[in-house]
Amino acid sequence: MQSFRGICFSLVFALLPLIMEAKTCCNESHTHSLFEPTCDLCGCSTSAGSFGFGSLKNSNFVGLRYIYQNYESKDGIFENSPISKEQFNTYQIWGRVPITEEIYVSSIMPYQDLYRTFEDRVEHINGIGDMNVIGWYQFTFYKKQEAGEINFSMDKVPSGHRIQIGIGAKLPTGEFEEALTDRVNPGFQLGTGSLDGIFSLNHGYSGSKIGVNTTTTYYLKTANKNDYRFGNQFSFASNVYYSFPKTTHIIMPFLGVSGDFYNAIEQFGETLPDTSGESYSGAIGSEVVFNRFTVGANYTFPLKQSLFGDNVKAKNKVSIYLNLTL
């Protein structure tokens, strides 16, 4: 386990300096998409969907992804109140599979390895997390033909703009333990135990060099068998990336910002105090495409947050992944 984490962090720091370079895109026929809806720790962190549903390169793929998240929780309002530190390690199989030219399905299957450290003890849980499945429909926009212009190929010319609509579900495949909700951070769970709806809208633009993607996602959450219901959530993310080639690969660095707004947790119809909140984050990262393989890294850092009555602080997060284009 320790050696794997070491490899992950080495890859992250090896990829991040690539954002200092800039060239022109080597293949303008490619379009790109970054589905990057981030999520609050009490909902999507347990489903391991907090780093998005796809990669920068808008292609069909299967891959492996590792996500590291950490939080700090304070049980009380005093300076000497007990503090716990949570570390979330998530290992995912993820992918995007085409159904038609306009329709495709994405899915994430996570394995969770979670640690919570107190002054006198360490809590550890691991196991399968909550899987999600989303169906997407893509609208592609084309350039209008100028008056008097003759198009000999008769092919439509893409404008670079597209809209993608996604509808799906987060499945209760991960175990939910009610006893763990007594802690300050009830998001320390393998799963939420509930079947939740996911509704997403993405707009993307790909030029010859620069691309912009904006995604909004709404999570409609239901109560689990313990009548425990995480609050509904709205998330947004916007990212700007730059594409340029090398002899044997393409480098695509990006910068982004995201936000999450979520309702309070409910149990037995009662609203639990200090469980609503909001957070804003920045992101920096890069992808490197080698023929059919893509290696990517994403570093996310908090900008502003108010979680669980300010008793929980989200720290920096890291994601790395390796995808095979289908």
Image (tube, rainbow, N blue to C red):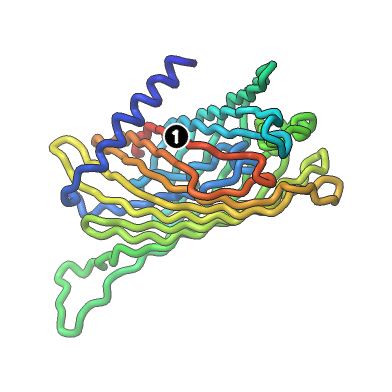
Q: Horizontal and vertical percent for residue 296? A: 35, 36
Q: Position of residue 288 (x, y in %)?
A: 28, 37
Judged left or right of residue 310, residue 271 is: right
Residue 110: image quadrant is top right
Residue at image location 37% in from the left, 43% down from the top: 284
What residue is shown at x 25% (from left), y 60% (from top)?
Answer: 207
Task: Give the side of residue 104 with respect to residue 295, left or right.
Answer: right
Furthest-front residue in this view: 79
Instruction: Give percent across and percent down for residue 166.
Output: 52, 55
The mark tally for this picture is 1
Q: Is residue 4 left or right of residue 271?
A: left
Q: Front-most of 254 and 306?
A: 306
- Residue, x 19% and y 50% (percent of image)? 25
Q: Quadrant of the C terminus?
A: top left
Placement of 171 over or under 167, stated as above or below: above
Residue 274 location, x and y as percent? 73, 47
Q: Residue at x 54, y 41 (%)?
A: 49
Local SS, label 1: strand
Q: Quadrant of residue 132?
A: top right
Q: Amino acid at mark 1?
A: Val
Q: State the residue position of label 1.
A: 318
Residue 130 appears in the figure:
yes
- On screen, residue 112 versus residue 14, left or right, reads right
**Residue 173 visible in this rendered orientation of the protein:** no
Position of residue 271 relative to residue 8, above or below, is below
